[in-house]
Amino acid sequence: MIDDLPPLREVIRRHDLRAKKQFGQNFLLDLNLTARIARAAGDLSAADILEIGPGPGGLTRGLLAEGARHVLAIEKDPRCLPALAEIARAWPGRLQVIGGDALAVDPLAHLTPPIRVVANLPYNIGTELLIRWMTPPDWPPFWESLTLMFQREVAERIVAQPGSKAYGRLALMVQWRAEARIVLTLPPEAFTPPPKVASAVVHITRRAEPRFPADAGVLARLVAAGFNQRRKMLRAALRGQHPRIEALLADAGIPPTARAEEIELERWCRLARAVVAAGPA
Ligand code: SAM
């Protein structure tokens, strides 16, 4: 037993926490598993942890038992709050819970760096949160690492390499400024209720500097345009981006007939620099 609290099945029964689809609820009830996810996040003892969507608190308990200095957990479903209050009482001064929507709450006022984010995310907001965390106005971001559960297909898109079907905007925008790897893959049966597909935990650590220089906004715009029409040749997919796009592609070493998925990060960054150097259209 990793703490003195009752088993999660009992917590769920007592607080009547039947999973609701509207909240994207698929709970992890095996505390050995949640402890493994917590350990995948690195050294927790010297960090404040932001957890999104603690639900009945399985991962929260894993984080605390693995020594997290402080956990701030944001949960939208008010039914979960009494169960989380019990965990806060068992770990005095270590867990703060905010009831609300993680997309609307600003957690930074409640956290002291270094900060790590650990979450079994609700699938409906997972990629939106990841993009937000990867695209702050300034770099480095507020977090040192993100350890996040996604549908396996999304996790594979995050770590994908050029030429693969999964390679696209998510891979480029994450790998430009961070290192990402899949640390755990879980079958649907690991969750209650089981989702339709497998899941995977991705561990992302920020780089001090982006891998190659580029303006974040320009890079994001080019990559989005290129992959929006991923079957088209880049000279067509990027036509609206600059009147001299063919010349700029050549400057970046990109054949105008190439498709977005064939181009690795370095040349996307070169293209972003060429577009900036060419000045306004
Ligand atoms: N962490 C728990 C676990 O591993 O068992 C629950 C994970 S469950 C996949 C996602 C959790 O996020 C649910 O508890 C759900 O109520 C919560 N949630 C959904 N949308 C949210 C939002 N916008 N803000 C904060 N929490 C949200």
Image (cartoon, rainbow, N blue to C red):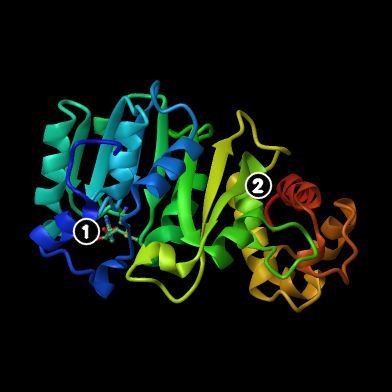
Q: Is mark 2 within 8 Å of ligand 1?
A: no
Mark 2 nearby-residue class (10 Å; few <14, some 14–19, many ≥20): many
Residue ranking furthest to the front: 1
Image quarter for ligand 1 equals bottom left
In the rendered image, which quarter is residue 55 located in? bottom left
Amino acid identity at mark 2: Gln
In the rendered image, which quarter is residue 5 located in? top left
Q: Is residue 119 above or below residue 49?
A: below
Q: Is residue 234 above or below residue 159?
A: below
- Mark 2 / mark 1, whichever is N-terminal: 1
Q: Who is closer to the viewer here, 33 or 266?
A: 33
Locate residue 105, reporting x and y percent: 24, 47
Tag on residue 120?
Answer: none
Q: Is residue 100 above or below residue 277?
A: below
> How many badges with numbers are in the image?
2
The quadrant the N terminus occupies is top left
Would you say 14 lies left or right of 230 here? left
Locate residue 218, reporting x and y percent: 63, 52
Query: Which element carries disc 2, helix, strand or loop?
Result: helix
Q: Examine the rendering and report whether any part of residue 215 can be seen.
A: no
Q: Residue at x 62, y 62 (%)?
A: 157
Amino acid identity at mark 1: Arg
Q: Residue at x 75, y 53 (%)?
A: 268
CA–CA distance between discs 2 and 1? 38 Å
- In the picture of the structure, the residue carrying the numbered disc 2 is 175
Mark 1 nearby-residue class (10 Å; few <14, some 14–19, many ≥20): few
Q: Disc 2 vs disc 1: Cβ atoms closer than 8 Å?
A: no
- In the picture of the structure, the residue carrying the numbered disc 1 is 9
